[in-house]
Amino acid sequence: MFSYQLYSSRNFPPMSRTFEMVSKAGYTAVEGYGALYADDAAVAATAEGLAATGLTMPTGHFGLQQLEMDVEKVLGIAKALKMERLYCPYVMPEDRPTDAAGWVAFGQRLQKAGAPYKAAGYGFGWHNHDFEFKALADGSMPQDRIFEGGPDLEWEMDVAWVIRGGADPLAWIERYKDRITAAHVKDIAPAGENRDEDGWADVGHGTVDWKTIMAALRGIGVRHFVMEHDNPKDDARFASRSIASAKAF
């Protein structure tokens, strides 16, 4: 299933236009993020956008504090938007642990935060960036330590961030093939290019070997492939070119 992370279009309002654009581009699903369910009105507008275009929202991102403090609200959002899996997407630099024990504790915190959602029947896990692949003083990786502390956590693997972190995505896919339940599909521009798009590229138009990586992800049973671009100049261009490339892999 090819999905579209709606965060990619945050700078191209209104979101109703984005739902129409994504549907016309050939997507059947989208992934939500915080602003789309910031309050009841936002949830209602998101639900209306999905219904009007026939799109589904099987996965969604929620901040850790909201997951911990507003369990009933998050469960209500997930039910209203018919989600299947919830992922915590980020931890601010000032809140990141600095040693192995700290990351293990962070994994334990995620595991605890996810318990009520798993109990309600939702998948729950972590979405990475690059900092999880920067070796700690003891030589270990934060990503490993997170999963050590959270043995039941799923993983939405953001492949391009793994690469930007200096790691080999194929090795990590093999290592955690039993945890990866979704993947972010985005591409990295050649060095020095697309500076006005933070060095990202449309899928299939960058340096990531998506043909090989997508085959590996499909091989372990991943169903949710979420297209994302952190800062596109033209979101419709990104959406259409990326799904065309992905369908050819």
Image (spheres, rainbow, N blue to C red):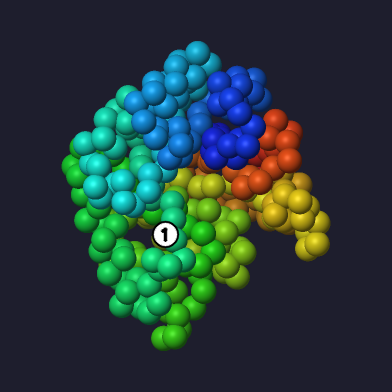
Q: Is residue 81 left or right of residue 240?
A: left
Give whichever of 224, 13 is nearer the camera: 13
Quadrant of the frame with the C terminus: top right
Mark 1, residue position: 91
Instruction: Say if residue 168 shows up in the picture.
Output: no
Residue type of the residue flagged with mark 1: Val
For residue 152, which quarter of the picture? Answer: bottom left
Q: Is residue 64 above or below residue 151?
A: above
Report the side of 49 relative to 148 (left or right): right
The single residue placed furthest to the right in the displayed view is 193
Q: Residue furthest bottom?
A: 138
Q: Residue at x 55, y 40 (%)?
A: 7
* Residue 112 in the image, given as x and y percentages of width and height: 22, 56
Up/down of 124 relative to 174, above or below: above
Looking at this view, is 244 or 40 the one in front?
Answer: 40
In this rendering, the count of numbered labels is: 1
Q: Which residue occupies the foreground of this view, 227 or 62?
A: 62
The quarter of the displayed image where residue 176 is located = bottom left
Report the residue that reaches farthest toward the top: 52
Q: Quick check: 62 above or below 168?
A: above
Residue 23, how many percent across, how many down? Answer: 59, 22
Horizontally, residue 108 falls left or right of residue 50, namely left
Disc 1 packing (10 Å; few <14; some 14–19; many ≥20):
some
Q: Is residue 62 visible?
A: yes
